[in-house]
Image: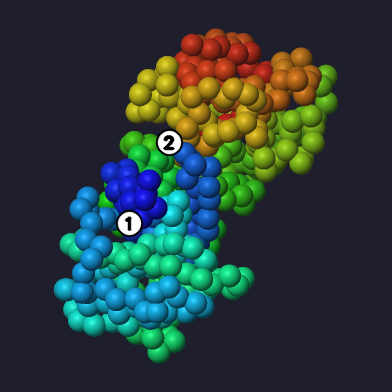
Amino acid sequence: MNKLVAILMVLAFYKANAQNYRLTFAATGASNSIDSIQVRNLTQGTALTLAGTDTLNLQGVLDVPNTFNSTNKSLRIYPNPMGQKCTIEFEAPETCPANIAIFNTSGKRWIHSDLFLEKGQHTFQLNNLNEGLNLLAISSPTYFFSEKLMSQYSGNEIADICFSDGKSLTDKGSRISTTTANSTGMQYNDGEWLLVEAFSETYSSVTTIVPSASILIPITFFECTDGEGNDYPTVQIGSQVWMAENLKTTKFSNGSDLPFVPAWTDWTNLTSPGYCWYNNDVHYKDSIGGIYNWYIAANANLCPAGWHVPSITEWGTLSTHLGGSEVAGGKMKEVGTSRWKFPNLGATNESGFTANPGNYRHWDGNFPGITNAGNQMIWWAAEDGGSAEWAFSVNLSNGSASFDNGTSFSKKTMGYFVRCVRN
């Protein structure tokens, strides 16, 4: 197959399967500014961090029409073949955002830059392009021009393109953005889930999206600080706002100490509030949170002010919003098997709930062995259903995408985890 034809086929394929989108972010709620943003592509497993004022450029491949015009007078390259550098002259037919890219014969993109080009003549200098046959493409939403480009350069310097006077393509007001924000690129294919966690001083907020266009994403910050001073990320799921990690406080919301009960004999006989860390090791505090018996979970002052331990009905509301108990668990679980044991069925975390596994404390005061690590996560619900010894709990498993959200009764002396929901 002709190598140039192969390049064009690759471009045409990506046109049908990917687009370039620009995501910008704006803060609302408890803070009106964003310090930084972490973005994770839950489908690809990639991640990056950008400043709160930055634009995220989700990059498919070029936004190219299905017909190609590779012989034209608007695009000229000389010398061609090139050595270490060459000159590119381009006559832009109209004023609009544009894209310059260079691909090799396998369709790999060497150079990619977004510009705002005025109608008329533009001259660029290309440097250090790897040896071989390439395709230069300049495109916009309404035009596409391309030319074959042969390079004879065999050095080790990184390829780059700039204006003919040596200034970078980000100079001369050539960026599409009219602000001082930077643009950070991330590979993205249509239909993939992104998890966005934004930070502002002590606040953090989680959002999950499947972008299908260039959009402004509102980031709503909620105050969520417990009696010990720990701050929690939050995530809005449907009409509810949840903590995006487990509670880890050692104090009630009024600042008084929670009863710490490490000894197994004392735990067994408790009929009053008590908490501990897994295996009585405080190093588990930040990774999985605190372990609480039901008596303390039922206390209205356990969660941060303005938050509470969810009722079984509220857990059910979450499950319904996520498609029902058969699939909700997968949408709540963190992806992968770095913390969940294989196979972690159905895990997508598309809700942003970010549930990870954690061992519990048995009613007799013992802790399950290491063989149980990664199997499940269990949270308390606020009600006991009128029972003196038993109360509602909900759980997730590594072996299922389902969410048991109301059929489980546990002894009140069991030690489980707590997620709070906003009032």
The structure residue drawn at horizontal position 53% and vertical position 55%, both measured from the top left corner, is 48
**Mark 2 surroundings: few (<14), some (14-19) or many (≥20) residues within 10 A:** many
Which kind of residue does numbered mark 2 sit on? Ser
Residue 106, placed above or below residue 388: below
Residue 364, placed above or below residue 10: above
Residue 49, placed above or below residue 179: above
Which kind of residue does numbered mark 1 sit on? Leu
Q: Which residue position is annotated with label 2?
A: 351
Q: Which residue position is annotated with label 1?
A: 62
Estimate the x, y position of residue 346 in percent, counting from the top left.
49, 24
Residue 41, placed above or below residue 374: below
Secondary structure of the residue carrying numbered label 2: loop
Gap in angstroms between the C-alphas marked 2 and 1: 30 Å
Label 2 or label 1, whichever lies nearer to me, is 1
The answer to whether 386 appears left or right of 213 in the picture is right
Estimate the x, y position of residue 365 in percent, counting from the top left.
77, 19
Depth check: give the residue in front, 361 or 185: 185
The answer to whether 298 appears left or right of 108 in the picture is right
Estimate the x, y position of residue 204 in percent, counting from the top left.
50, 53
The structure residue drawn at horizontal position 56% and vertical position 40%, both measured from the top left corner, is 245
The structure residue drawn at horizontal position 65% and vertical position 33%, both measured from the top left corner, is 339
The structure residue drawn at horizontal position 48% and vertical position 58%, both measured from the top left corner, is 37
Q: Does residue 34 appear in this view?
A: no
